[in-house]
Image (tube, grey):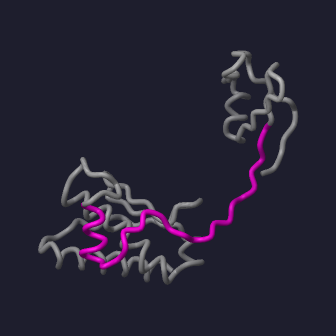
């Protein structure tokens, strides 16, 4: 799986080098991205992270659109510096001019959401259910407190959970 994607990353950089007539520093490529994002460009680390699950499920479009999208972020950063908008003019120029692709900000891949357990917290307010994530619930167990914004009383675990 990574060979094809790595080859596409290299092809995108070579296209940019021909277009701009200058070299670009190659990034580290990682396949350790989960969740809803297909790819992420870490500008300061010169790192590209890709979602292997979404790649497997959408490989053709992923190689055609997602890889150039993320490479364009690194190229724009190397060309124009820090103070550009992530999907601004400079990035759009690269998407249209170099890769001849529409500058789509987001993918349209189907995302399978994992179920998550929510921990129900309450305060004296009527109808006050606050659904805490497992992470926030763990922080409460470690001693962190949360207050209701209306009554300013502490939120207390009700003992109830729900799966979303």
Query: Taken as a whole, is the magenta stretch helix, strand or loop?
Result: loop
The image shows residue 102, relative to residue 150, as above or below, that is below
Q: Residue at x 85, y 30 (%)?
A: 158
Q: Residue at x 17, y 77 (%)?
A: 19
The image shows residue 4, relative to residue 79, as above or below, that is below
Residue 54: x percent and y percent?
A: 57, 71
Region of the chain picked out in magenta, as a range: 90-119
Q: Residue at x 24, y 75 (%)?
A: 97
63 to the left or right of 162: left
Instruction: Write down the quadrant of residue 27 in the picture.
Output: bottom left
**Residue 98 seen in this snapshot:** yes
Residue 25: x percent and y percent?
A: 23, 65
The image shows residue 21, relative to residue 128, as above or below, that is below
Q: In the image, is residue 115 part of the stretch drawn in magenta?
A: yes
> Relative to the observer, which residue lies in front, 37 or 24?
37
37 to the left or right of 111: left
Instruction: Write down the quadrant of residue 94 in the picture.
Output: bottom left
95 to the left or right of 137: left
Q: In the image, is residue 18 part of the stretch drawn in magenta?
A: no
Residue 112: x percent and y percent?
A: 68, 66
């Amino acid at each position: 799986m990574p060979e094809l994607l790595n080859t596409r990353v290299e092809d995108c950089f070579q296209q940019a080098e021909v277009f701009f007539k200058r070299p670009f520093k190659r990034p580290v490529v990682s396949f350790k991205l989960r969740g809803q994002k297909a790819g992420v460009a870490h500008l300061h680390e010169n790192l590209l992270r890709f979602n292997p699950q979404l790649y497997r499920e959408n490989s053709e479009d992923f190689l055609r659109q997602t890889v150039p999208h993320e490479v364009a972020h690194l190229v724009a950063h190397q060309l124009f510096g820090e103070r550009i908008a992530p999907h601004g003019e400079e990035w759009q120029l690269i998407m249209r001019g170099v890769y001849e692709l529409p500058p789509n900000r987001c993918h349209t891949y189907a995302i399978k959401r994992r179920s998550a357990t929510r921990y129900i917290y309450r305060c004296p307010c009527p109808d006050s259910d606050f659904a805490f994530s497992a992470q926030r619930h763990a922080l409460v167990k470690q001693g962190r407190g949360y207050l209701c914004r209306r009554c300013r009383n502490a939120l207390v675990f009700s003992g109830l959970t729900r799966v979303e």
